[in-house]
Image (tube, rainbow, N blue to C red):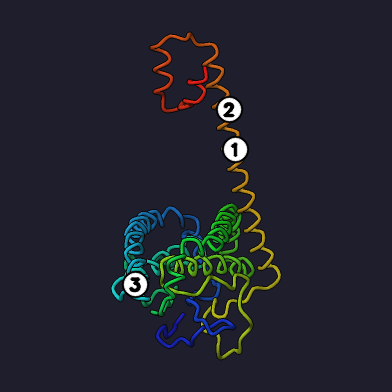
Amino acid sequence: MTAEWNQRPVTSDEHGEWLPVLDIPAPGRQRRWTVLLRWLLLLPQFVVVVFLGVAAFFVTIAGWFAALFTGRLPDGMFRFLSSVLAYSTRVDASAMLLVDSYPPFALSAPTYPVQIEVRPTPLNRAAVFFRLILMIPAMIVSSLLQSGWYAMCWVLWLITLVLGRLPGPLYAATAAVTRYTMRFNAYASLLSPAYPKRLFGDEPAAADEVRSGTRPLILDTAAKVLVVLFLLLGLAGHITNATVESNTGEDTDASGAAAGRHAPDSLPLRSAQEGSFFNLDFSRQDAR
């Protein structure tokens, strides 16, 4: 797909607030062998994303202090963080079967079919100060969406492998997850003051205003149902994990208590039990 990435119209919400843009080509044919080996081929990219994420974390901390006093993110930090966001979004789009092209190992990739646009914008100091608190609801939604998508990823992978393409509703729902995640990351890293929104897509636009498969991002009823399903699956997964961890912790405590009741109350054994990494329950030891 040919696109002039530097000639994009402004995307605003009803309050005139500009939102970060994600451009992904409309769904098309994919090579089945790349679909078959997609996640294996992307392993090196995942490693790079981890290292870039660590660097971006520390830059974001420094940028938080700078933005708190100046009301904006310094240009160098903005360029680096936006490049990292673009890199991770390209990898996400490939991993989520939205594009067939392999993402390049480069922070700048103007010819790659997946593009984002974030713009330097003045930041509200109060919103910067409370950013960690303000972003919690969006973080929860983003986490549920991604967890739900990956719970269904094998089904989507199999469908794409058999058909050689990602069907329209699956494409739209997956693109909605990718775009919301990108907008959340832009907000969390101070690249945008706009709170993540439009999870269920945009309003239809005239044909001459369509720039890519995701601008505007139109979700039909099936795609919206899939987004809700991702949220519910993500919620179910988190609840299940919390329940399993709680039960595991209770079983561990019960086993430790039973062992303590049947063990001789000698000083060497008592000291060993208190020093064990897996049985640190000093309140019970003191009470006994």
Asked whether the beta carbons under mark 2 and mark 3 sit within 8 Å of each other, the answer is no
Label 3 element class: helix
Residue at horizontal 64%, vertical 73%?
219
Q: Earlier in the sequence, mark 1 or mark 3?
A: 3
Disc 2 from disc 3: Cα separation = 50 Å
Q: Earlier in the sequence, mark 1 or mark 2?
A: 1
In this view, the mark in front (1 or 3)? 3
Q: Nearer the viewer, residue 128 or 148?
A: 128
Q: Is residue 95 left or right of residue 245?
A: left
Label 1 element class: helix
Label 2 element class: helix
Residue at horizontal 61%, vertical 78%?
202
Asked whether the beta carbons under mark 1 and mark 2 sit within 8 Å of each other, the answer is no
Q: How many marks?
A: 3
Q: Position of residue 4 (x, y in %)?
A: 42, 85
Badge 2: few (under 14), some or many (20 or more) residues near its Cα, within 10 Å? Answer: few
Q: Which residue is mark 2?
A: 251
Q: Nearer the viewer, residue 240 or 217?
A: 240
Say which amino acid is labelled 1. Answer: Val
Q: Residue furthest right?
A: 221
Disc 1 from disc 3: Cα separation = 44 Å
Say which amino acid is labelled 3. Answer: Phe
Q: Position of residue 230 (x, y in %)?
A: 62, 58
Q: Which residue is mark 1?
A: 244
Residue at horizontal 57%, vertical 69%?
176
Badge 3: few (under 14), some or many (20 or more) residues near its Cα, within 10 Å? Answer: few
Badge 1: few (under 14), some or many (20 or more) residues near its Cα, within 10 Å? Answer: few
Q: Indicate which disc residue 69 carries.
A: 3
